[in-house]
Image (cartoon, rainbow, N blue to C red):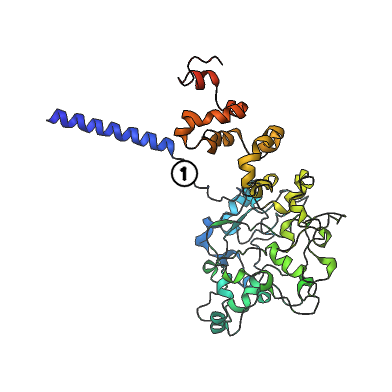
Amino acid sequence: MRLGTAAYALAALAALAITVAVTSGCRRAAPPPPPPLVAGPDRFPHGAHTAVGCPTCHDPASVQAGTPRVPGGDDHAPCDDCHAESFRAAPGPMCRVCHTSVDPTGARPSPLRPFPADDAVRNLPSRFSHAIHLDDERMEGAVGFHVSCSDCHGGADAERPAAADHGACGRCHADEVGLEGVPALSACTLCHQDTAAARHPRKLITGDLRFEHELHRTDARGARIGCETCHDGTAQATGERHDPPSTATCVACHDDAARVPVAKRMRICETCHTAKAETIGAIAPRSHLPGTERPIDHTLAFRSDHRAEAQDATRCAGCHQMMSGNPRAACDECHQVMRPQDHTVLWREYDHGGDAVVASDRCATCHVVDYCTACHRRPPRSHAPLGSFGTGDHGDLARQNPRSCLTCHEPVTDCVGAGCHQGITP
């Protein structure tokens, strides 16, 4: 019994191993998690200085004023309180934290690196929620007024909204304000996380694209354009980052003649692009046009007479790129579900055979060989009922048009070899 039990256990383990091997081979392995963000070796290691405390290096007065002072100076204070030996030694890795190059003799300047560092990693990213700060009821109870975009991103006279800094935050978060339940500027760790994060990429103003906020404060009628008109998702953003306006949002205003001059329509490339100009016959992308917009040549007749125009697939792809995965195969979205006008019921029964012989290339535009074979493997309707047709009724049709029989049947095998027409020499 013990030997049998052991053999059974070994067999079960072997089966389990085979199952695991098979299933692991069939299932796609989960992708490895992305590596943690790591700042460059020359970046200041904030994590190693957590115990020191932010006010030790960043002058509290400068923090309250909204411009935290860069630590260090000509005498390397206050860093030399802990790193005096390194400063007295020959220039090394520590010097590269602040300087691009160092001349220990003092004969030439030792230029500082940009501050903050202009790379893809942010040290000590802030905890910020647009949703909280744009909650009118919550802000009214905490600070006594509704916080608006211009309170943090520059006033009404600012040429363009600026990123919020300590100066903007200090209006509510300065220590002397003393608002209950509101993080103070001096409590750095309540806002800044001891980690690294990716910088927010610029998604809107890139390349030759231009946009001026000061021209979007009022429309052509003089009516105010609020920030939420374009940035409609900001109030629901739970983090610091929020998505830029969609192109459809721009189209809604720019194609309204009452709000925007005709010369600034979205279809006119130079409205937003500095390196592009409008040309005669140019067609704007589908995303830059209203939902009801169509090119001038897209008449009712164009639906059936667009073969010549469709030869230029790039022109069609300007609007029809959202109809399929491949912009140049957008035709399939319609032609896979819509039939040519001559494909009627009678055409299927009587006419498609002759047309297929004369213009087989036309059939191949939509149909493959398997499509034809799938139908022609079934007996034609003229062969019904099969019992009587096979015993004698097929003779009349065979004498009238023997070529139709040869479409599917081989005389040697189907007529003579099957035992029907014995003694007949084909």
Of residue 34 and residue 323, the one placed in the foreground of this image is 323
Quadrant for residue 174, please give it: bottom right
Specify whether 419 is left or right of 165.
Answer: left
Residue 110 seen anywhere in this rendered image of the structure: no
Instruction: Where is residue 76? Give x, y as percent.
Output: 65, 58
The quarter in which the C terminus is drawn is top right
Q: Please give the name of the residue rendered at 52% of the width and 15% of the height, measured from the top-left corner.
A: 424
Instruction: Where is residue 77? Give x, y as percent.
Output: 63, 61
Image: 296 above or below 391: below
Q: Secondary structure at mark 1?
A: loop
The quarter in which the N terminus is drawn is top left
Q: Please give the name of the residue rendered at 60% of the width and 41% of the height, measured from the top-left corner.
A: 349
Instruction: Where is residue 181? Give x, y as percent.
Output: 50, 78
Q: Amino acid at mark 1?
A: Ala
Image: 381 above or below 258: above
Specify whether 16 is left or right of 247.
Answer: left
Q: Which residue is mark 1?
A: 30
Farthest residue to the right: give it: 280
Please state the total of marks drawn on the protein image. 1
Q: Residues within 10 Å of mark 1 (few under 14, many from 20)?
A: few
Specify whether 283 is left or right of 52.
Answer: right
Q: Please give the name of the residue rendered at 73% of the width and 65% of the height, measured from the top-left corner.
A: 251
Of residue 136 and residue 125, the one placed in the foreground of this image is 136
